[in-house]
Amino acid sequence: MKKGFALGMAAVLAMYVVLVFQRALDLVRSGEPVGIVMGTALFVFPLLGVWVLVVEIRFGFRLERLVRRLEKNDGMPEPLPATPSGRAELDAALEAFPKARDDVHEHPESWESWLRLSMAYDAARDRRRARKAARKAIELSRGK
């Protein structure tokens, strides 16, 4: 579901970029100083959006690949009790978190430990730290 949404957003962004670039060309071709500045800005900002989207999609694919490797090696953490929506129960996630944290302290160069920590942060609803730990797992996995 998330992958389909990301690809759908990429398609919408691509259509947006094409339309904005057409408008930017019209503004630059106007020859007016304000039009040239606005047209130039209209070229730059969508490119920044494309760059951010590419970075996020690459992150997602790399993370998905690591999760598959962890599953294949039977390294996934124990499943936690879930709410009806499918999310881990917060109390169970907070209770399981110290195990993942301690694992990283014991094995700081293990991408597997960092990925499990990322999952623990995500289950505990701390997305910022989950992404940071996932990036560390991806970085460490490149060396292996």
Image (cartoon, rainbow, N blue to C red):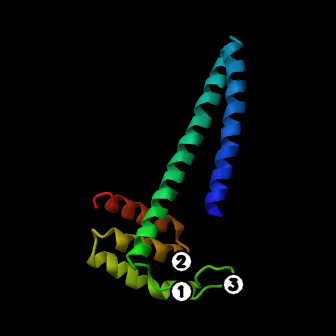
Amino acid type of the residue tagged 3 in the rendering: Pro
Which quadrant is the N terminus positioned in?
Answer: bottom right
Q: Residue 27, how many percent across, how many down?
A: 70, 19
On the image, which quarter does residue 86 sit in?
A: bottom right
Residue at label 3? 84
3D distance between C-alphas at marks 2 and 1? 9 Å
The residue tagged with tag 1: helix, strand or loop? loop
Q: Residue 110, how many percent across, how many down?
A: 30, 70
Q: Tag 1 or tag 2, which sits nearer the N-term? A: 1
Relative to 138, is 69 above or below?
A: below
3D distance between C-alphas at marks 1 and 3? 13 Å
Amino acid type of the residue tagged 1 in the rendering: Leu
Name the residue at the front extreme: 72
Q: Is residue 81 visible?
A: yes
Question: What residue sits 50% from the left and 48% below the top?
Answer: 55
Q: Is residue 117 visible?
A: no
The residue tagged with tag 2: helix, strand or loop? helix
Residue at label 2? 123
